[in-house]
Amino acid sequence: MKAWLAWSSGKDSAWSLHVLRAEGRVEVAGLLTTVNASRDRVAMHDVRRELLQAQAHAVGLPLHVALLPDPCPNDAYEAAMRAALDEARHTGIQAIAFGDLFLEDIRQYREAQMAGTGLRPLFPLWGRPTAALAREMVAGGLRAHVTCVDPRRLDASFAGREFDAQLLDDLPPGVDPCGENGEFHTFAWDGPGFERPVRVRPGRVAERDGFVFADLVPEATTGDEHVPVAGARAT
């Protein structure tokens, strides 16, 4: 079975890719990412597109981008996703994999979105206890930085930090270790399945729209970090 992986640029997406490849039952044939068209950054995670493209290059997969307006009403999001799913189906893709962990309403929404598309939704990390899963990621060599924090749920000082054992130790009670309730989002820059690291350094930290974002800056450009973006929304 060939699948695209819904790729947020974060640790859960990266670990889903690792798990799917290790299990060997699904061939991941591409990455699908929503990008804020006005900011040219990954939606919600606020990661620069050049870093997203470098990730795709590092894991050896084509990148498919669905552009979203800003602001993005739900009908605009769903229209962009329908177009992406149509593209996937017409190129021989049979499934879309998601890195969701336990939020039933999110899973039900994705399943409803995909009903009638001919594509099967996959959830390779579903139901795994998140405390153990977060430690498994770190022990397995996944490297990531926190790019976004919801300060209503987690102190803003976590923005920009490395997702590592020390961060997990420092999380206050009630915060999910994988940030599944929206407490924080990450950018995965190395780990299983990466042919090379995507080296970054934390840049400016700023508050916007009620969230705290840590801009990640590429450490160096070697000249070969661009990966062609597939599909009608390619750049």
Image (cartoon, grey):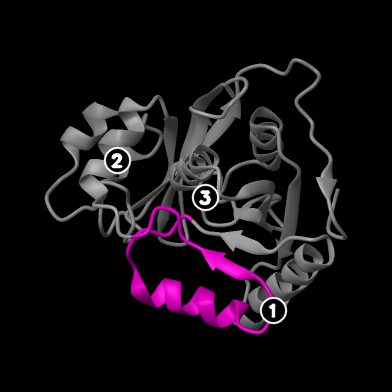
At horizontal 61% and vertical 62% (from top left) the residue drawn is: 96
Residue 106 inside the magenta-drawn segment: yes
Question: Can you tell which quarter of the image residue 180 is in?
Answer: bottom left
Q: Secondary structure at mark 1?
A: loop
Q: CA distance from mark 2 to mark 1?
A: 33 Å
Q: Disc 3 or disc 1, which is closer to the eye?
A: 1
At label 1, counting other C-alpha atoms closer than 10 Å, the crowd grade (few under 14, some 14-19, many 20 or more) is some
Residue under numbered circle 2: 134
Residue 32 % position (x, y): 67, 54
Q: Does residue 152 appear left or right of residue 22 in this picture?
A: left
Amino acid, disc 3: His
The residue at which mark 1 appears reads as 117
Magenta part of the protein: which range?
A: 99-126
Q: CA distance from mark 2 to mark 3?
A: 18 Å
In the rendered view, tell whether residue 220 sits above or below residue 200: above
Q: Residue at x 79, y 31 (%)?
A: 226
Taking depth in this image into account, of 180 and 70 the one nearest to the observer is 180
Kind of residue at badge 1: Thr
Quick one: label 3, few (<14), some, or many (20+) residues within 10 Å?
A: many
Q: Magenta stretch containing residue 201, yes or no? A: no
Residue 37 showing in the rendered view: no
Query: Residue 125 vs residue 157: left or right?
Result: right
Residue 232 position, x and y percent, is 88, 60
From the image, which quarter does the N terminus lie in?
bottom right
Tell which circle, 3 or 1, labels the residue nearer the N-terminal end: 3
Which is more N-terminal, label 3 or label 2? 3
What residue is pinned by disc 3? 45
